[in-house]
Amino acid sequence: MGVLSSGFAEMNSAEQPVILPEPALEEDAMTILSALLLVFLVMDPLGNIPLFLVLLEPVPPKRRKKILLRESLFALGFLLAFLHVGRYTLNALRISQPALGIAGGVVLALIALRMIFPQLGGMFGLTPQGEPFIVPIAIPLIAGPSALATVMLLATQHPERMGAWTVAVAGAWGVSTLLLLGSETLRRILRPRGLIAVERLMGMILMTVAVQMLLAGVGEFLSASIG
């Protein structure tokens, strides 16, 4: 019996290194996926499609996709810049992680409310006519204040995972860019009511993310104060 028990113990110890890495890899992938979804929801490409169509209406149809691609590249540059440099700015301003989490949750909640209950003139009000350059398509429609604050929050909470956050931001940007390039087709398929319905559904999902971010920020603040 002693020989059998020792044999089983050796088998169990030999199996452990094979089993343990699988959940870790799965958790890592889910973290990147959740960050990608968060950035995508904050960018709100479906909700901004009507604004893009209005802004590009005076532009010849052949130039519209080129302009959208150019503005999307500008937006990606701003997002990556805030992702990699924004946390140093926050450290210089001495903004704590709980404060950033609470502020990010409040901003996301306000954006989600405007997505659920849209206002006249869109989320950012009236916009100038003509061919846009950086403003207002790249900033603030694609890379808006909430998106920039979100990527800074990701970098501040887990600075050791900058590679994962870069992949998540680039993935969210890629999906948003594809949707924007197909804005004319989406408008014909979904119609105005379909676009509104999708935007409000995304707003509900974003509201739950905002509440979770607020609770996490308040929890970190209370634990730091008590400790």
Image: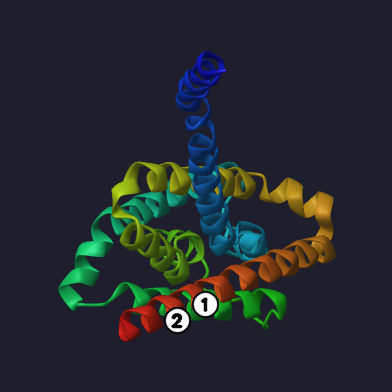
Placement of the C terminus among the 4 image quadrants = bottom left
Name the spot of residue 225 as percent of width and height, x first: 32, 85
Q: Residue at x 41, y 73 (%)?
A: 101
Placement of the N terminus among the 4 image quadrants = top right
Asked if the residue under mark 2 is in contact with the one under mark 1, i.e. CB atoms within 8 Å, the reply is yes
Q: Residue at x 71, y 76 (%)?
A: 116
Q: CA distance from mark 1 to mark 2?
A: 5 Å
> Which of 191 and 110 lies nearest the eye of the viewer?
110
Q: Which residue is mark 1?
A: 215
Q: Image height check: is 36 above or below 208?
A: above
Residue 10 shows in the view: yes
Q: Is residue 127 left or right of residue 50?
A: left
Name the spot of residue 216 as percent of width and height, x first: 48, 73
Residue 170 is drawn in which quadrant? top left
Disc count in the image? 2
Task: Look at label 2 and name its amino acid.
Answer: Val
